[in-house]
């Protein structure tokens, strides 16, 4: 009994203590800034730095990577047969007519990743291209090629990352290797890239 209680306490500390400490520290910093400068100052500070600082963008991008890994690898229980459903489900709807939640979630999971990848690593290229286009309409084709290359890079990156996740699940036996997951993840990354391009084109 005592061993079980002690084990539960230590496991909870091990699991939640680091995150709780970081959240507490972050909240304290935010409260200090709000109390001394006001909420408007905090908003302008965050918005300005997110637009200009690659470090913050990269941190958010890495956060989504960790979030995905935690959802797909670290937070999974051991699976007896990782080859039990290789093809997976390829429809939004299940056989009984209900929504295929896993199919939708696997797409949505990679949308923020595709968006943040381009915001972090392709934002300067996008801005340079747009500035060049504004000076001359001759390079419209160059602008289109730039956007297509962004989508291609995101597609390849999402595909490779998804394959890595599925192979890791296979080796660690913490999930089922499914081709449909790779497809959905890749589609989600591409959607994120397209959303980024649309935001940059029409968001101003």
Image: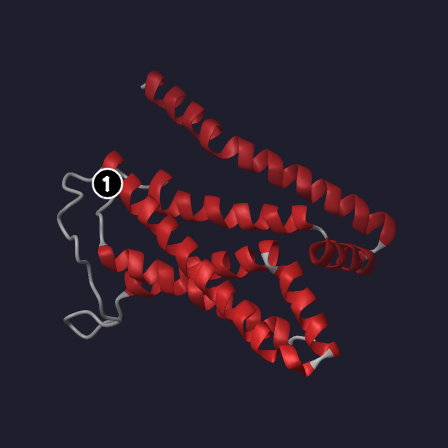
What colour scheme has been applied to the protein in the rendered image?
Answer: secondary structure
> Residue 36: horizontal and vertical position, in percent?
86, 48
Q: How many marks?
A: 1
Spot the residue most to the bottom.
Answer: 137
Q: Secondary structure at mark 1?
A: helix
Q: Nearer the viewer, residue 130 or 199?
A: 130
Q: Quadrant of residue 159?
A: bottom left
Work out whether residue 17 can be spotted.
yes
Residue at 40% over, 63% down: 188
Quadrant in the picture for the N terminus? top left
Which residue appears at 72% of the width and 78% of the height? 134
Q: Nearer the viewer, residue 112 or 5?
A: 112
Q: Is residue 32 left or right of residue 2?
A: right
> Residue 48 is drawn in which quadrant?
bottom right
Q: Residue furthest front?
A: 138
Looking at the image, which residue is at 35% across and 17% down?
2
Measured from the top left, where is residue 89 in percent x and y?
20, 63
Answer with left or right where residue 167 lies relative to residue 204. left
Query: Is residue 117 positioned above or below 70 on the image?
Result: below
Image check: 186 left or right of 93?
Answer: right
- Residue 106 in sight here: no
- Which is more toward the observer, 197 or 177? 197
Per the image, the residue denoted by label 1 is 170
């Amino acid at each position: 009994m005592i061993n079980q209680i002690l084990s539960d306490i230590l496991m909870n500390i091990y699991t939640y203590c680091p995150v709780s400490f970081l959240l507490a520290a972050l909240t304290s910093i935010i409260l200090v800034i709000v109390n001394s400068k006001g909420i408007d100052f905090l908003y302008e500070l965050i918005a300005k730095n997110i637009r200009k600082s690659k470090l913050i963008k990269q941190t958010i991008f890495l956060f989504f990577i960790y979030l995905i890994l935690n959802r797909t690898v670290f937070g999974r229980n051991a699976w007896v047969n990782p080859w039990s459903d290789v093809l997976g489900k390829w429809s939004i709807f299940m056989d009984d007519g209900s929504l295929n939640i896993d199919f939708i979630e696997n797409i949505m999971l990679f949308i923020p990743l595709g968006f943040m990848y381009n915001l972090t690593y392709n934002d300067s290229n996008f801005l340079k291209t747009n500035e060049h286009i504004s000076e001359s309409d001759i390079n419209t084709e160059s602008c289109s090629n730039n956007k297509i290359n962004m989508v291609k890079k995101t597609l390849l990156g999402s595909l490779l990352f998804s394959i890595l996740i599925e192979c890791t699940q296979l080796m660690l036996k913490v999930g089922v290797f499914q081709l449909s997951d790779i497809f959905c993840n890749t589609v989600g990354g591409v959607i994120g890239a397209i959303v980024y391009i649309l935001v940059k084109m029409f968001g101003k």
